[in-house]
Image: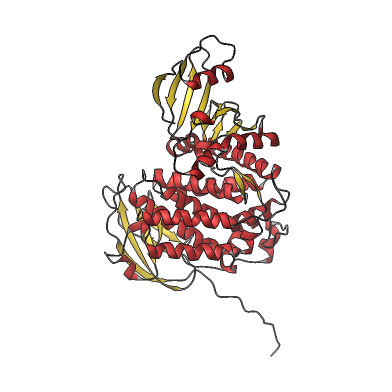
Amino acid sequence: MSTLYLGKLEYADPLYEILLSQVCPYMENPIFHVDRMASFGVYKYTEEKTRVAAIGKFFRLDDPKPEKISRIKGEYENLQKIRAYGFDSFPNYVVRPISKEETIGLALLEEYIHGKDLDYYLRKAIYDRDDVSLKERLSDLASFLYALHKKTGSEENVELNPISVYYEKVLNKLCKQEIISLSEKQGFFKLVDKWLVKASLQKGNKVIVHGDATPTNFIFTQRHDIVAIDLERMKNADPVFDIGMVCGEIKHVYFWRTGNPYRAEPFIRHFFESYSSHFIDDDKAFYEITLRNPFYMAMTELRIARNGYLDLNYRKRLVHEARKCLEWGLRLATGEIATLVKSVLSEKGFSANGSIESSESRTRGKTMPMVRKRKVWWESVPGARSYVLYLSEGREIFEPDKFLWEATPGIISKQVCGKTEVILPDDWPEFPKEAGTYYIGITSKDEFGNQSDPFMLSGSFKFVAPPAPSQGGIESL
């Protein structure tokens, strides 16, 4: 995390007496060095000799946004409340609040935790290929969130209106920033409305959620204990609120840093399985989380897309991913994809209806239909580091005035590295299975993210076998 050194804290500063009495009460004339943290209004105070440190969070006394001030000031009570549930000891720990003094704009003084945040392990996995450490930390995070949700759970159903209001706020901001058009915003509203009436979303039980489960808000100590910080957005909500946010953040990190969101999938899957493993009926938990996760994951992607420090085209691509996530999640209610989701459970020895069934008996009882595969190939291009395949049911979407690469509305894309062919449907699970004529555009992509115009292919595809005869017999002639 980047910091900016500001110098020593003046003895006359009213904060000095607070630090003296609350952080270093037995020292004579301690000297505190001040660093400004990456987040606005957040500072680190480190005592010169002992290196004991604390974090101070401030709000502007003249801030015109009362809702924002209330949220920041509420973190002190949030920390006290959640620690009372048993999160005041390791391995699942919530940072300790020390003091507050609203007359000087100090919303919270809290202990400083030494360690590495989740983003550190994400970067190690991406740049150093250390997938093992990342999966271990994701398992730790899953255990923490399960404990948080379990200890604070209730029998009350979640209230979806606050989530609907938040979606509206985020979409209005994106429209104002011209990341989405007015018609796109209305399209998102329609998708959200369809989600809000889904029974699977409405039946979630209310728990206390972290509310801002980003990679920088979870610290891992040398002993691999986990410490949660920044709980100002803590609230009552569906536990999948936190799960979907973690998944959305993982996808964003891989998408942003590698250009390939699908590299995040093994880690999202691992996180899902780690969280579900704490339930008595883990396969049922996995399935129910899968049904609700796209709603909260898409919300996270839209939330991230508001950030102005991100590239404009990337922000539009994130919005497109969020739309696909919402649309895909709505299709989970149909037999078309529910069967695919349940097939994940079958890999663990469960049949589609959740009953235990050995893979051997399944193999004996039913032979898989034969589906002929197809190969899509193209010539290698000098200077290309990867290729991106785009799929549409209509050619018009590839017209120069409509094609926006990954940000093209309604298009499906896949990045391919290290080869110049894909085998369908194995290498591209999102490719439609139903019969139809599909148009495929293939672009070359260099190390800077520049992409060529698409080279076009089209063909008829079908990856679904006809059903077997339902009746038959043997007769004598």
Tell which residue pokes out farthest to the bottom in this image: 477
Q: Is residue 279 above or below residue 227?
A: below
The x and y percentages for residue 41 are 45, 33
Tell which residue pokes out farthest to the top in this image: 28
The image quadrant that residue 398 belongs to is: bottom left
The x and y percentages for residue 106 are 51, 30
Q: Determine the residue positioned at 41% across, 30% down.
A: 2
Q: Is residue 82 above or below residue 476?
A: above
Whether residue 347 is visible: no
The x and y percentages for residue 283 are 67, 53
Q: Nearer the viewer, residue 347 or 226?
A: 226
Q: Is residue 5 above or below residue 65?
A: above
* Left or right of residue 477: residue 52: left
Figure quadrant of the N terminus: top left
Figure quadrant of the C terminus: bottom right
Q: Determine the residue positioned at 71% across, 49% down.
A: 154
The image quadrant that residue 354 belongs to is: bottom right
Q: Which color scheme is applied?
A: secondary structure
Q: Is residue 9 above or below residue 105?
A: above
Whether residue 269 is visible: yes
Q: Nearer the viewer, residue 404 or 41?
A: 41
